[in-house]
Image (cartoon, rainbow, N blue to C red):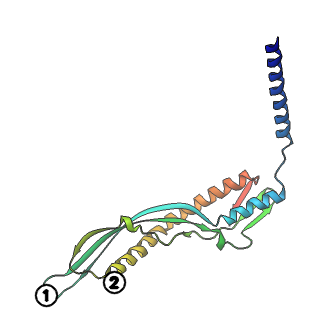
Amino acid sequence: MIKKIIILLLVAGVGLALFFFLRWRAEEEEPSQVDMAIEITSVKEVAEWEFLTVEMEEFEDTVIPRMIISDDQFARIYKGTARLGVDMKESASDWLITSQDTIWIKLPDIRILDEDIIDDTQTRTFYESGKITPEIKSALYERAKVDMRKRALSPENVSAANENAKAQFTYMFRSMGFNTVLFE
């Protein structure tokens, strides 16, 4: 008899809990304007948003002519990663305009987020002959960095990063309740 009472109380408790849960879910309402403003502000506070990662390898070499015996030669392979995205700190004050269920977004230009794109731990000397000064090594390093920047910021990569940015911001703002997301 006690077993039946306990089972009956458990079933009633679960039913009551289910009733209050469903009632609570039905009473949930759209986020308030204050909640929306907080969410939008937090989007800007993230600052750097990465939309494309480009892994690269760059071969740089130099030959320094010597008059007597032979030339000095030096070749290195530089590896690195460029992260393309936007820095929301660079966005205009009117970067976001809302009207009912529509939002207009002005994102900053796509750029390389971290200028240190060369990974020194993966840089390898390919060939070295003769005396190479630190200045020559530094010049090769800078040349590799410039070449990697050019490759990372190719029109194809910038376009892909822009498309990824639009897709991610569209998804995020649609989940906040905006049906139409437009970009400038």
Give the residue number, with chain letter if any, for mark 1. Answer: 68
The percent position of residue 109, horizontal first and vertical second, equals 60, 71
Q: Is residue 94 visible?
A: yes
Quarter holding the C terminus is bottom right
The percent position of residue 101, horizontal first and vertical second, equals 79, 56
Quarter residue 148 falls in: bottom left
Q: Amino acid at mark 1?
A: Ile
Label for residue 135?
A: 2
Given the current orientation, which residue lies at the most extreme left position?
69
The percent position of residue 53, horizontal first and vertical second, equals 50, 61
Determine the residue positioned at 54% across, 69% down: 113
Label for residue 31?
A: none
Determine the residue positioned at 79% across, 18% down: 7
> Does 138 sit above or below residue 12?
below
Q: Secondary structure at mark 2?
A: helix
Determine the residue positioned at 83% across, 59% down: 34
Given residues 71 and 20, the one toward you in this image is: 20
